[in-house]
Image: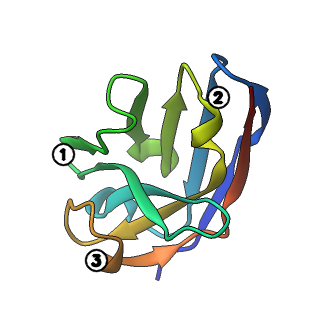
Amino acid sequence: QVQLVESGGGLVQAGDSLRLSCAASGRAFSSYAMGWFRQAPGKVRESVAAISPSRPTLFASSVKGRFTISRDNAKNTVYLQMNSLKPEDTAVYYCAAGRELTMNVDRYDYWGQGTQVTVSS
């Protein structure tokens, strides 16, 4: 069992940066692939980025070059650094833990409650 708590969301202007954090409970954090996902009002949840236990990463094309994902296994925490934010990045951002590195939302077993990111134009 893994419990996840996101933080770091907020209201920013276009072009600004934010760093989201996701703190995980449980001793097996380092063995999980971690993903960040987002869901805007009226839209399906979409993948943003993912990182494997050995740190290879995947990114959605919409955020590649602007977002980075990293993890600190000693702190049981995964981060999403978001630069050059756009209004279309506005969404609730969720972190999730799974057994394989994938961008498939259905392959993740544990989810946080989400943190709101709002980007004004």
How packed mark 3 is, by other alpha carbons closer than 10 Å (few <14, some 14-19, many 20 or more), is: some
Residue type, numbered disc 3: Arg
Is 11 above or below relative to 121?
A: below
How packed mark 2 is, by other alpha carbons closer than 10 Å (few <14, some 14-19, many 20 or more), is: some
| Distance from Cα at disc 2 to Cα at disc 3 | 26 Å
Q: Where residue 10 appears, x then y in whole percent?
A: 79, 39
| Distance from Cα at disc 3 to Cα at disc 1 | 18 Å
Q: Where residue 48 appears, x then y in whole percent?
A: 40, 49
Q: Earlier in the sequence, mark 2 or mark 3?
A: 2
Is 23 above or below relative to 58?
A: below
Which mark, by number, is residue 119? none
Which mark, by number, is residue 107? 3
| Distance from Cα at disc 1 to Cα at disc 2 | 24 Å
Secondary-structure class at tag 2 = strand
- Label 3 or label 1, whichever lies nearer to me, is 3
Which mark, by number, is residue 18? 2
Task: Say left or right for 5 vs 58.
Answer: right
Residue furthest to the right: 11
Secondary-structure class at tag 3 = helix
Is 8 above or below relative to 95?
A: above
Residue type, numbered disc 2: Leu
- Label 1 or label 2, whichever lies nearer to me, is 2
At horizontal 23% and vertical 52% (from top left) the residue drawn is: 52
Task: Say left or right for 92 vs 45.
Answer: right
Check disc 1 and report the residue beneath it: 54
Observer-nearest residue: 75 or 17?
17
Residue type, numbered disc 1: Ser
Secondary-structure class at tag 1 = loop
